[in-house]
Image (spheres, coloured by chain):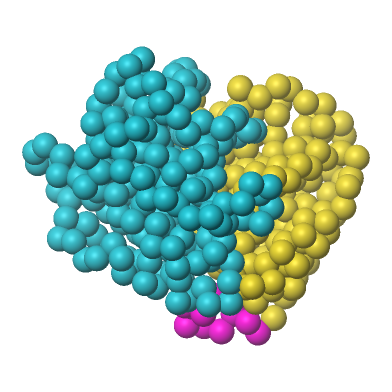
Chain colours: A cyan, B yellow
Amino acid sequence: MFSGCQFSLYPMSDNFVEVILPAVKAMGNPEDLRIETDDISTLVVGQPERVFEVVAKAYEAACRAGKHVVLSALFSRGCPGEPDDPLCTPEGPSKGVHEGARQDAGADSATRGAGTSSIATTGVEIDAQFSLYPLGIAEYMTTIASTVRAVKKAGVYDRSKNFCTRLSGDLSAVFAAVERAFDEAARDTGHVVIHLTASKGSPSKKQNSDSM
Amino acid sequence: MFSGCQFSLYPMSDNFVEVILPAVKAMGNPEDLRIETDDISTLVVGQPERVFEVVAKAYEAACRAGKHVVLSALFSRGCPGEPDDPLCTPEGPSKGVHEGARQDAGADSATRGAGTSSIATTGVEIDAQFSLYPLGIAEYMTTIASTVRAVKKAGVYDRSKNFCTRLSGDLSAVFAAVERAFDEAARDTGHVVIHLTASKGSPSKKQNSDSM
């Protein structure tokens, strides 16, 4: 399986370079990931949980350094057009830092309740929307519907919008919900893509989200 | 059919609000479109060619007002989860402003050559990448491959990246190529989504793209 992410950080400020570069560096240079940056996006290739982990880390760093910062990320797993890569295949039990998120993702939907109580919060409040694409199957709308139902139980669901689902909450909880959607959909098809847009500190939001 | 776009403009500057709001207003308030903005994105609902036209218009306006400006756009047509809307169904021949683009899109792939010569250029050079999702069909990779082959003939193809296809050229030509991909893929399945990221003026790009 090949899995990874193309993501971009958009700090709405003159000093955007000083926000982006340290945030990308915050991911480190771990041996279990391949990270490449060009002028449009940064590619991270590796196991899905590790990919979510470091992209969240980069976005969190950017949010702390900038005022209004947006993340746009494409998460993909199982694209048949990409080569298999040992980096992307788990060798053993999860070694992820977000243990709370992983335990949460492993729990049954019905028992999750608020769902995010076990996740270590970052204190960074974000608004987000994501679109899920389970590819190669006729019944993909059923997969989307059941996945969104699961996400609704994660405590960060805001509302449905045209073409996407809107979330709101702590950065960790939002990422855990999106990662859960990614995992859930992968039960139905090998090739799953999620596009996530996350926004922190927008002046258009009535509620003051700069209070972190 | 329901078709539309969720898009966001990201000017990397302190005065981002003064770049975004006039750009969104540049779309006008046409009767044949429904336009709604929240703090994450702007929704445009209408016929695909009109949607591409006004989103290009908004991005062009933002590019002219800002220095480094990114567009992130989700174009969708035929999502079965959305209600049919008369706004989205063409009543007659195209009335689009981008006649060049439309004629081009209607031409046979093999005869296109450079392909974009008939499109009125904006003088705004951009770099872009897009991902195409033909949904609900097992043979979606065939659709993607043939669509990318057609895009390669449009004169703006740069290279393949993981999970996406990179383009470079005049804003009009890039949009025409992406719209063409959208139309091409719709021959194979009713539900097609394209995510487009376009970037103008990035300092990370070696070539000076601020010369517009």
Residue at (72, 53) in percent of width and height: B55
Q: Is residue A35 above or below residue B185?
A: below
Judge whether A193 appears above or below B203 on screen. above
A78 to the left or right of A128: left
Q: Quadrant of residue A6?
A: bottom left
Residue B180 on the magenta span? no
Specify the quadrant that holds the N terminus of chain A: top left
Question: As rendered, which of A202 and B1 lies closer to the eye?
Answer: A202
Task: Compare residues A205 and B21 and report the one nearer the observer.
Answer: A205
The answer to which of A171 and B143 lies nearer the viewer is A171
Q: How many marks?
A: 0
As displayed, is residue B158 above or below residue A133? below
Spot the residue most to the top: A110
Q: What secondary structure predominates along the stretch shown in magenta?
A: loop
Residue range in magenta is B201-211
Can see residue A74? Answer: no
Residue shown at the point (56%, 84%) measured from the top left: B208
Percent of width and height locating residue A156: 48, 34
* Residue A143 in picture, x, y percent from top left: 43, 21
